[in-house]
Image (cartoon, rainbow, N blue to C red):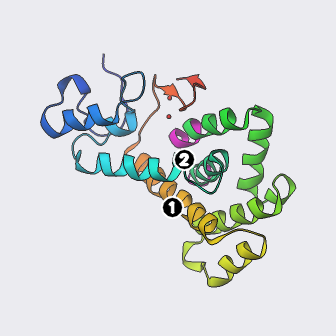
Amino acid sequence: MTETICWLDVIEPEDAKGTLAETYDAIRRADGSVHNLYKAMSLRPEPIRAADDHYRAILHNPDSALPDWFLELVGTMVARLCDCTYATTHHGANLRDLVGDVAKADAMLDAAVEGRETAVLETKLAALVTYARKLSEHPGDMTEQDIAAARAAGASDVEILETAQAAACFAYWARIINAIGIQIGDETVGRYGGGTSSS
């Protein structure tokens, strides 16, 4: 029996042809598997590569001004705020792996979601979390003062932009995932070797 990975019909990699087959080959994980996230988008594969490239340019860019663990923190916070289990599970695992301390990573994530970031993060990063949380919860209320507050805490404009991009990227993914019921299933969890049951 085929595993149910979402609420839509799915074309598995072994059944893919043409553009979809090429797309699957381009976005396979290191172990050769394809994320359920992408399989769930198989009926309209044209956006998959662009979406994957966009995500990687934001979260896995070696030239980022902000550390990878912080971008994962922002992304996972947004996923939690959206009640997106798939992204929270994957990127929570990435955050734990990058921080190297499960309890510390979980405490940072809980604090970020609950608005207690100043208790666990240095001033600049706490201000960026505050900015990202407001963007996630009240996007229509953003003002130039939000930028000024992040700058006053020591954030550069590049760091502010990267934070906004990470938060907005995960807002997109969380809504796609929740909209069509994407499940983790038996995927390997995380990008950095975290756990099993899916990045």
Marks 1 and 2 close (CB-CB < 8 Å): no
| Magenta-colored span | 80-89
Question: Mark 1: which secondary structure?
Answer: helix
Q: Which residue is farthest left?
A: 18
Q: What is the quadrant of residue 10 in the picture?
A: top left
Q: Which residue is mark 2?
A: 62
Per the picture, the main secondary structure of the magenta-coloured stretch is helix
Queried whether the magenta region covers residue 190, the answer comes back as no
The residue lying at 74 percent from left, 40 percent from top is: 105
Q: Amino acid at mark 1?
A: Ala
What residue is pinned by disc 1? 168
Front one among 122 and 196? 122
Judged by depth in the image, the label closer to the viewer, 1 or 2, is 2
Q: Is residue 97 left or right of residue 174?
A: right
**Residue 43: percent from the left, percent from the top?**
21, 42
The alpha-carbon separation of the residues under discs 1 and 2 comes to 19 Å
Count of numbered circles in the view = 2
Q: Residues within 10 Å of mark 1 (few under 14, many from 20)?
A: some
In the rendered image, residue 5, in percent from the top left (x then y), is placed at 37, 31
